[in-house]
Amino acid sequence: MFEINGKYLVLMVAGLVSLILRFPFLRIPYLYAMDSHAVPKKLRNHLGWSVRRAVTFNPDLSKIFRTDKALIIYYSVTGNTRKVALAIQKGLRKGGLEPTIKKVSEAYKEELYDYDLVCFGTPVLHAFVPPPVNRFIRKKMEEYGRKGDRREIRVPAPTIPGKNALVFVTFSGPHIGVEEALPAGKYIRVFFGHLGFEIKREWYVVGEFHGWKAGSISGFLGDIRGRPNAEDMVRIEEKTIKLVKSLKLESKQ
């Protein structure tokens, strides 16, 4: 019975907030309260949660809440993933989004829903994400999945219009190529799916296997020394610009 009541509450809140946001004289103070530090953080969190439910209920409202901001979160040991993150940062800026870039260790307090696009990057360790990346994901899953009617992770998980994700994975694949990287990428994809983000792209980028010469010369992909190289960076930057343009086009439709 509790779950049923919880679902009814979500529908009631979504419908009410959706109605409020239709009228400028009600919407303006609501938006002000969401962004004002004069309002207690707990209340601001509740207002943001209500908006996400309303947007799910009425997708057209997502246009009101576009931030034109993007967040890049990455973990890098040898520098391969960092290079890709920096290329994405350039592409985002050239495409017209304001990028914020942070290492995984710096991003724990980030509110992912404050951004139109969240880009998450990692290297591969034994076909999976490294422990620091997994810890971050598990922590965020716990944070957004806490019990109560205002949790973000719901059953089933509704896609929240206007919230998008890009997954990027660097790999060497000395044994079987990109197949070694797919589980890591899919794991991150599932994480964002639980949060209601629409995964727009899933990129796998070849990177040199630092510390193992044979893995970078004689592996499944041949000689990958120096990868990702300058050409890879330009290609990633161009792909990012195209992604941003497609997001902006979607927002106008």
Image (spheres, helix red, strand yellow):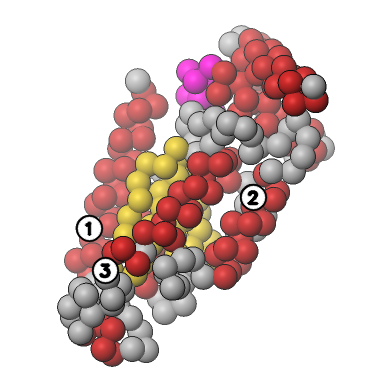
Mark 2 belongs to which amino acid? Met
Q: Secondary structure at mark 1?
A: helix
Residue 79 lies in quadrant: bottom left
Q: Which mark is residue 123?
A: none
- The picture places residue 86, in percent across and down from the top left corner, at 38, 63
Is residue 2 visible in the rendered image? The answer is: yes
Q: How packed is label 1: few (under 14 Cα within 10 Å), some, or many (20 or more)?
A: some
Q: Residue at x 53, y 61 (%)?
A: 102
Q: Which mark is residue 235?
A: 1
Mark 3 belongs to which amino acid? Gly
Q: Which residue is mark 2?
A: 141
Query: Which of disc 3 and disc 1 is earlier in sequence?
Result: 3
Q: Which stretch appears magenta?
A: 58-67
Mark 1 belongs to which amino acid? Arg
Q: Which mark is residue 177?
A: 3
The answer to whether residue 217 is above or below residue 128 is below
213 left or right, relative to 141: left
Q: How packed is label 2: few (under 14 Cα within 10 Å), some, or many (20 or more)?
A: some
Whether tag 2 and tag 1 are in contact, CB under 8 A, the answer is no
Q: Secondary structure at mark 2?
A: helix
Residue 49 lies in quadrant: top right
